[in-house]
Amino acid sequence: MIGTTAAARPDVSGFVLAGGQSSRMGRDKALAHFSGRPLIAHALSILAEAGVPAAIAGAAPEVRAALSTYAPVIEDSQPGLGPLSGVCAALASTSARFAAFVSVDTPFLPPSLIGYLLCHAEITGSAVTLASVAGFAQTFPAVIDRAALLALQRELTAGRYGCFAAFEAAATSLGRRVSVLPVELLAQAGHAVHPSGLPSACWFANLNTPADAERAERLWARRVA
């Protein structure tokens, strides 16, 4: 089922989490360039190619105006508390049942992975649907049922800012579960495939520093060549 998407489904919204201090990058990561485009443009393209209308959540106040030229920006009422705050603000802004979240600094995620996570969430009714690589669950991308919002807000209010722990707490409060899908199996079965043939071990590479960006550029240049 290669390229599964959420096209034309009114029950899905997409969000790019563009918060964080970007201290290791030296500038706001969302506007840092990779392969000729800002990272925010890559992240929005991943959701768009998965058929998901997207907005930006968790952006720092000083870059909101610049980011708003790419997509609507959801204001975070509690900035500085990490990605969980952006997740809550995003869920509060939508009436869609499911929300798909990607981080701004993972440009190698294949759109088909987002589509498959959404498909799995709809079929199973999982409160939160994640992927794992090499046996380790990845916090993002994530597909979250909006019903989890109140429990996630409780975690945030209590000062528990870790996303994965908050996802588990929200799922438990709903009597449901967090689904974690191994990307290696999805790739082997053809459910999630990178359009440029990048192996699944590379899909979750984070661009946190200029050195990370340089390595990613070299990897991408080799794949394109």
Image (cartoon, rainbow, N blue to C red):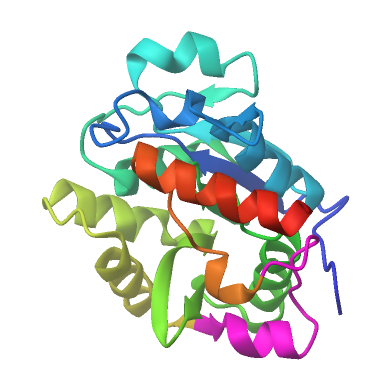
Say which quarter of the image contains residue 36.
top right
The residue positioned 69% from the left and 61% from the top of the image is 110
Residue 51 visible in the current orientation: no
The residue positioned 72% from the left and 41% from the top of the image is 45
- 102 to 179, vertically: above or below: above
Q: Would you say 49 lies left or right of 182 here? A: right
| Residue 108, x across and y down, in percent | 61, 55
Residue 184 is covered by the magenta coloring:
yes
Number of labels in the image equals 0
| Residue 199, x across and y down, in percent | 65, 74
Say which quarter of the image contains residue 3.
bottom right
Residue 108 visible in the current orientation: yes
Residues rendered magenta in the picture: 180-198
Q: Would you say 116 lies left or right of 9 here? A: left
Residue 102 is covered by the magenta coloring:
no
| Residue 154, x across and y down, in percent | 23, 54
- 13 to 54, vertically: above or below: below
| Residue 149, x across and y down, in percent | 41, 54
The residue positioned 12% from the left and 52% from the top of the image is 158
Most foreground residue, 166 or 44: 44
Most foreground residue, 73 or 94: 73
Say which quarter of the image contains residue 119.
bottom right
Q: Looking at the figure, which quarter contains the N terminus?
A: bottom right
The residue positioned 59% from the left and 56% from the top of the image is 219
Q: Would you say 80 lies left or right of 216 here? A: left
Q: Residue furthest left?
A: 159
